[in-house]
Amino acid sequence: MLPDSLRRRRILRLAAPIIAAMLTQSLINLIDAALVGSLGEVPLAGVGIGGYAMFLVTALVFGLSSGVQAQTARRHGEQAWEQRAMPLNAGLSIALAFSLPVTLLCLWQAPRLLGLINPEAQVTAVAVEYFRWRVLSLAAVAMIFCFRGYWNGIEQSGFYLRIMLVMHAVNVAASVCLIFGYLGLPAMGAAGAGAGTTLSLYVGLALWAMLSLRHAKPSGFLVRKPRRPALMTTLRLATPHSFQQLWFAAGYAVLFWILGRIDTASVAVGHVLVNLSLLLILPGVGLGMAAMSLVGQSLGRQAHGEAHRWGWDVVRLAWLALTALALPMAAFPELVLSVFLHDPDLIALARLPLQLTALMIVLDAAALVLAQALLGAGANRTVMTVTLTLQWLVFLPLAWWVGVVWEQGLLGIWWVQLGYRCLNSLWFAMIWQRRRWLWLEV
């Protein structure tokens, strides 16, 4: 067993590049919005709607990352060096087979899909054009998830950050040229932002492929076709996580619908609070992804006690990191809110909910880490069941009842959300302590 200091260093060495890369990845839609902002309100709204639609479609392939990472970490722990890339081969095959027909369907049905999200004809027209360019990258996104899972699974997460930085540079350069028509290229407007982002994703895919061809061949990368058991295992692990991600994202759409039943101010404040929380929990998610690899490798070595300990070691680091991020929001709420809100009434409305958000972030640490750690053990269905049960059968009904029926408004909903986050972490902690996940096959 490693000393505590060495364990912390190992966690941080694995998690730090993942966290940095995830922070930069969250900027993709923000970069597109910033570049299109000068074109006016309608293009900006269209890019926002198109970006959200792409987020929903991407959720369908999101589980490939955890599915590949869990298997790779297990093979790494077993020291089955020549089989480590077999899950990657299976994931890439599934990514291609699934993403191509989905892409064609989305290209065909884009007006109907975007019309469901936003009824305004002008905004929808821009959103459709932008979305069609973005959805062309679905195959690249799906395969990048697979490569990310493989390299994180063998504790080589630094490549993820380096490739993301190259992709961002390409995205900005290509989008600027295509939006405004520089260097003799056509001025495509908002659609140019979508085309530039798609180009950057294929550049990233090419870099992942070259890296893997150079270094992952001894681990079985593209040595032979994936066999049926590998394909079925990857599907079994990926499907619940993708399903969970899709409905988790849809849950936020329902939350904003509930806020809309209160008043416009609640919607505006809710958007700020949710976006802040989703950004600030990324260190917790990144640490959780590190736990996924460490737990999977320990289980591959049959070191069950060590696998259990890794979960709590990472949770403790997540508590420290998220507390540091939450303190400014709790201590100086008006200062933080003034960056996003300029109406004194909105700032007053958001003050206490922001402080509750700060507390939620800290309370959420155990759920963020242990859910990812359970994915590393292969307990994907358990994670999906707990997450969606608490969100759809507890939080959203109570949010409607307290916020709208009892007329407690935004503040009442945020108190409900605080209780939901507490219950979420407690439930995952109980599952972790029962240790039934120790005996799952991956």
Image (cartoon, rainbow, N blue to C red):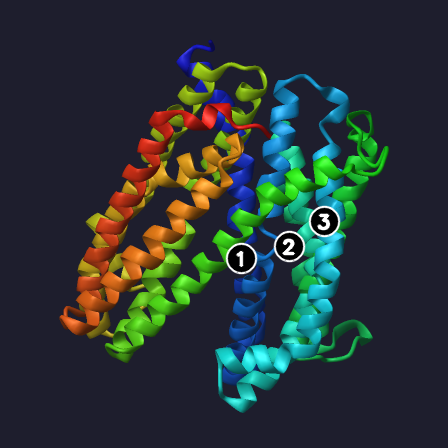
Direction bottom: furthest residue: 121
The amino acid type of the residue labelled 2 equals His
x and y percentages locating residue 363 in the rendered image:
27, 41
Are discs 1 and 3 less than 8 Å apart at CB?
A: no
Q: Secondary structure at mark 3?
A: helix
Residue at x-position 48% and y-position 30%: 291
**Percent from the top left, x then y, of residue 181?**
74, 77
Q: Secondary structure at mark 1?
A: loop
User: Which quadrant of the structure image shows residue 69?
Assistant: top right
The residue at which mark 1 appears reads as: 27
- Where in the figure is residue 412, as x and y percent of width and height? 17, 63
Question: In the rendered image, which quarter is residue 429 located in?
Answer: top left
Mark 1 or mark 3, earlier in chain: 1
Residue occupied by mark 2 = 168
Instruction: Kindly identify the residue that appears in the image at 79 percent across and 48 percent down.
Output: 206
* Image depth: mark 3 or mark 2 in front: 3
Relative to 90, is 70 on the left or the right? left
The crowd level at tag 2 (other Cα within 10 Å; few <14, some 14-19, many 20+) is: many
The amino acid type, in three-letter code, at marker 1 is Leu
Q: Position of residue 232 (x, y in %)?
A: 67, 41
Label of residue 94 in the image: 3
- Counting other residues with Cα less than 10 Å from the Cα at mark 3, is it few (<14), some (14-19), or many (20 or more)? many
Count all numbered tags in the image, as a single digit: 3
Q: Nearer the viewer, residue 399 or 55?
A: 399
Helix, strand or loop for disc 2: helix
Label 1 to label 3: alpha-carbon separation: 27 Å
- Discs 2, 1 touching: Cβ within 8 Å: yes
Residue at 71% of width from left, 19% of height from top? 80
* Cα distance in 3D space between marks 2 and 1: 9 Å
Residue 250 badge: none
Q: Estimate the spatial distance between the alpha carbons at disc 3 and disc 2, rounded to whole Å.
A: 26 Å
Eyeballing the image, is 16 above or below 177?
Answer: above
